[in-house]
Image (cartoon, rainbow, N blue to C red):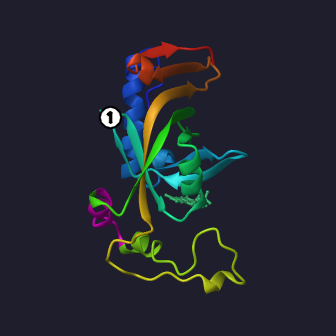
Amino acid sequence: MNTSKNHDNIDEIYKKIWDCLKLGIKESESDYHTFSLATSDEKLSYNRTVVLRDYDIEKHTIIFHTNNLSNKIKQIRINRNVSALFYSKDDKIQIRFTGHASINNQDEYCDERWNKMHDQSKKCYYQNIKPGAYVDHPRLVKTEKTDLLSKDFSIITININSIDWLFLSSSGHIRAEYLRSNKFAGKWIAP
Ligand SMILES: Cc1cc2nc3c(=O)[nH]c(=O)nc-3n(C[C@H](O)[C@H](O)[C@H](O)COP(=O)(O)O)c2cc1C
């Protein structure tokens, strides 16, 4: 994304954050297409890459898809506080979201999104062995193409509570924060 390097306007930066997400959904080559999702349980924290599927600028949410049997779902059930990390090397921008996650499964919303998915994506939700289980050989894991909404298909919505935006530059780093508790009005913070 070509974010102009003029980062003096905190409200413009806020708009650009959502433009980055828009691009991430549209362009699979965009740095914003995936993000690192952090979850935790009582003991540890965990990280993994997921694909950004949608966002809602009014509700301040970001959305990804996952398997309902995955470990991240178990962790979210224990602790719904999550964070999402985006980084673009080209733009020199890091965006960190924190929020709480909610899970949709086997409902109308899942049905609606499922019907818009490609066969290739649907297949992953018809897997004979549950994600994270030990297998004697990788080839023993099979998927099959089925059109019917899979019970393993879940949508995770992250309700954003904070956004931390950082631009790294030799001419001076710039950092801004937007909090739900402050109606997402921006504040500059020291990088
Ligand atoms: C580029 C990339 C995109 C991925 N997208 C997703 C995704 O959208 N949803 C998902 O559940 N896992 C996705 N994965 C797999 C996860 O990173 C992770 O390995 C898997 O979901 C198991 O994580 P868990 O054991 O923490 O639940 C992706 C992995 C890569 C490398």
- 81, above or below 14, in the image: below
Number of numbered labels in the structure image: 1
Q: Is residue 1 visible?
A: no
Q: Is residue 48 visible?
A: yes
Using a 10 Å C-alpha cutoff, classify the residue at mark 1 as few (fewer than 14 neighbours), some (14 to 19) or many (20 or more): few
Tell me the residue at 38%/21% (across/down).
Answer: 12
Tell me the residue at 33%/60% (across/down).
Answer: 110
- Depth order, front residue of 70/47: 70
Location of residue 20 in the rendering, given as x and y in whole percent from the top left corner: 42, 38
Find out whether residue 113 is within the magenta segment: yes
Location of residue 109 in the rendering, given as x and y in whole percent from the top left corner: 29, 56
- 139, above or below 148, in the image: below
Location of residue 154 in the rendering, given as x and y in whole percent from the top left corner: 42, 60
User: Which contiguous range is marked in magenta?
Assistant: 109-118
Q: Quadrant of residue 14?
A: top left
Q: Which residue is mark 1?
A: 59
- 59, above or below 183, in the image: below
